[in-house]
Image (cartoon, coloured by chain):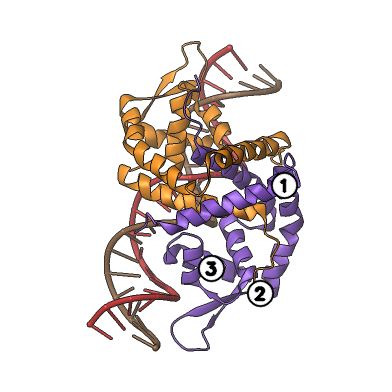
Chain colours: A purple, B orange, C brown, D red
Amino acid sequence: MDDTPPSLLYAVKQVELSVRAHLDDVLRPAGLTTPQYTALTVLARRSGMSSAELARASFVTPQTMGDLVTTLERRGAVSRTPDPNGGRRKLIALTTQGRRLLAGVADDVAALERRMVAGLDETEQGALRHFLNRCRAALSEAPVRA
Amino acid sequence: MDDTPPSLLYAVKQVELSVRAHLDDVLRPAGLTTPQYTALTVLARRSGMSSAELARASFVTPQTMGDLVTTLERRGAVSRTPDPNGGRRKLIALTTQGRRLLAGVADDVAALERRMVAGLDETEQGALRHFLNRCRAALSEAPVRA
DNA sequence: CTAATATCAGGTATACTGACATAC
DNA sequence: CGTATGTCAGTAGACCTGATATTA
């Protein structure tokens, strides 16, 4: 009944679906969606990215990211300032309010991660992280999106 | 530059974002979205599920799944038939056309998976699958979505 | 009455294509 | 000129809450 080849793609997708649902629940009270949260965490690491860079990092079109950033800007979580080096680029940065938003959900997100890996010891967690990083690298190498 | 605690949640999300983008590219020419494809693969394993069951398996509301099934039905990929045991349930099944759709993308999806795990040997692939399954199980156990 | 299911109405955020202006 | 960026317009699909009907 279940002799379908147990696809790794499917396993990743199932974990992701579950993570996504839980993350949505954690983020909703804070008024954040998962893509918005993702963009904020990326900005927390590297402030001053352009919308186009952010779009490439998130595998979406510049238009989609533009809309998302506009939403976050209206909410006061990020600011857009013209690139001091000139050009059309606008550099996006977390505001104090944005940092507060991230801090407000940090505990719940950490708890979610702890629950996800509850069944794995430290060595296994390290291995999982390693495997996932290699998968991500492999997918970046030979782009389908030619 | 990158001293943020390397979150496993983040690692899963990054792989998923990349998988999703590649999968969208593979599926788009066939006129399928990723959620639609997922539903079809679930039905390929277990035909005759109700929309509500499908929704639970995919972590979405019955309404959302209902819309998705309606779209697939209009496209001729699935059929809805009243439960022969009576009741309001409608059993959803893949049609020949639906099976053809799945078969049409199977090669490309398999190629995508091969590329994703290209950097892992068989033992590592097995471990990754094992870890992912345990993560999924752990997330199902203690529902946030009380 | 209750619980599960299906469905209608509506709303928002995601994401796309296409087009266009701006700046190097 | 050509390329990257930002943005406007329109569309489709994914997702939600709330309300309603049906049926065991």
Q: Label 1 neighbourhood size at 10 Å, few (<14), some (14-19), many (20+)?
A: few
Using the image as rendered, state which of residue B81 and residue B7 is in the foreground: B7
Residue at coordinates 67% horizontally, 69% vertically from top-left? A98
Answer with mark 2 or mark 3, whichever residue precedes in sequence.
3
Residue B27 left/right relative to D1? right
The answer as to whether the residues below labels 2 and 3 share one chain is yes
Q: Residue at x 43, y 66 (%)?
A: A62
- Drawn side of residue B7 relative to residue B86, left or right: right
Give the residue number, with chain letter if any, for mark 2: A95
Image height of B41 relative to B116, above or below: above
> Are discs 1 and 3 located on one and the same chain?
yes
User: Quadrant where the N terminus of chain B lies?
Assistant: bottom right
Chain label for disc 2: A
| Residue contact between numbered discs 1 and 3, judged by CB atoms under 8 Å | no
Q: Chain of mark 3?
A: A
Tags 2 and 3 in contact by the CB under 8 Å rule? Answer: no
Label of residue A123 in the image: 1
Circle 3 — which element? helix
